[in-house]
Amino acid sequence: MPVTITSRRQALASAGSRYAPVAALDGVELDASTAVVAKPCEVAAARALSDDQGGESPVMLSFFCAGTPSQKATDSLVRKIGLEPDELTRLKYRGDGWPGFFTATDTAGKTAALSYSESWGSHLGRDLQMRCKLCVDGTGEAADIAVGDFWDTDENGYPLFAEQDGESVAIARTQRGHQLLLQAAESGAVVLEELDLDLVVPVQPLQVKRRRTLAGRLLGRRLAGYQVPKYQDYEIWSQLLVGGLVIWKTAAGTFLRSFKSRVKAGSPDR
C-alpha cells in the first residue's frame, strides 16, 4: 500500500526499502503542493501524467532500482530463515546499518536475519518481474532528484556490501532538484560533496550492464513472440550495431528462456 506522509515522524517511520510489489501512485494527487517518492518507472508515469494535466508538477524523488521481486520471493525468503510469512509482526528488507539486514520477527518474538548480499544477491534479486528486466531506466531519469547507494569497491571495482556508515549518490536531474538539494544542505539535513558521475559507474555495475544490453533482451523477447516496450529518444536499437558480442549473447539467452516459458504449458511469463 502507498503511504501518505505529512509529518517528520511519519517520514522517519516510513523510511526504508521494500523489495516487493507496491502501487506507489495509487490515489496520489499530482499537484505542486505535494512530493512523490516512487520507483523510476512510476516517476516517469507521474511526470508524463502531470505534464499532460498542465500546471506545476509535484516534486518527484526516485532512487536507483534493480527491479521488483514478486511477493512470493519475500515469502520464500522468510521461510528460508525459519519463519512463516503469516506469523510476522515485523519485516525489514534493509536497515539498522548500511546496507543493513533482511530482518523478520514473528508473533512468538523469534527474530531471524540475513545479510544484504544473501537476501538480495542470492534470493530476491533472482526473482524479478520480466517487465523490470526490459526497463530502460533504473536510475530515475524523470525525477527531480534520484538517489542511490554509493558502495565502496574492491580492487576489481566490484561493490562491497560490508556493514559501514552509509553514503549515497544524489543526482539533481532538474534545476528544481538542484535547488532543493542546496536548501537541504543549508538547513543541515544533508551533507553534500561534489562527485564525478564517472565514479558512479563501477559502484552500480548492474545498472550499466542492463542499459548496455537492453537491446539484446528486447530482441530476444520479440523473436520468442512477445511484445516489448517501445522507448523513444533512447536509440536502443543502435546497440545491436555497436554493442559487440555481449548484445547477441544476451539476445540468444533471452530468446531461449522466453521461448521455453512460452511453450511450457501453464508456465508464468517471467
Image (tube, rainbow, N blue to C red):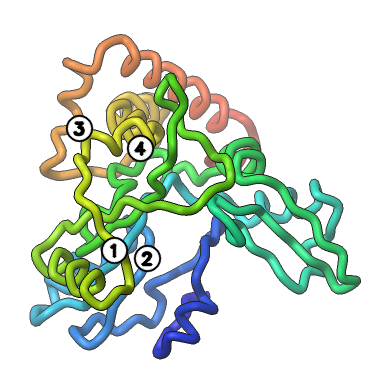
At x 50%, y 25%, the residue is 259
Residue type, numbered disc 3: Ile
Label 2 Cα crowd, 10 Å radius (few <14 / some 14-19 / many 20+): many
Q: In front: 238, or 211?
A: 211
Inter-mark Cα distance, 3 to 2: 24 Å
Amino acid type at circle 1 is: Val
Residue topped by disc 4: 207
Q: Mark 2 sits on what residue?
A: 38
| Disc 2 to disc 1, C-alpha distance | 6 Å
Which image quarter: residue 171?
bottom left
Query: In what element is the residue under mark 1?
Result: helix
Cβ atoms under marks 4 and 3 closer than 8 Å: no
Counting from the top left corner in percent of width and height, residue 12 is at: 49, 78
User: In the rendered view, would you say 52 is above or below 167?
Assistant: below
**Mark 1 or mark 2, which is nearer the start of the sequence?**
2
Q: Is residue 62 above or below residue 31?
A: above
Dots 2 and 1: beta carbons under 8 Å? yes
Q: Position of residue 262 (x, y in %)?
A: 53, 32
Q: Earlier in the sequence, mark 4 or mark 3?
A: 4
- Label of residue 236 in the image: 3
Disc 4/disc 1 C-alpha distance (Å):
17 Å
Identified by mark 4, the residue type is: Gln
For this rendering, which residue is in front, 250 or 81? 81
Front of the two marks 3 and 2: 2
Q: Helix, strand, or loop for circle 3?
A: helix
The numbered dot on residue 219 is none
Mark 4 or mark 3, whichever is nearer to me: 4
Residue behind mark 1:
43
Q: Look at the numbered discs 3 and 1 and tell me whether their residues touch, using CB distance below 8 Å.
A: no
Q: Residue drawn 15% across and 24% down?
A: 238
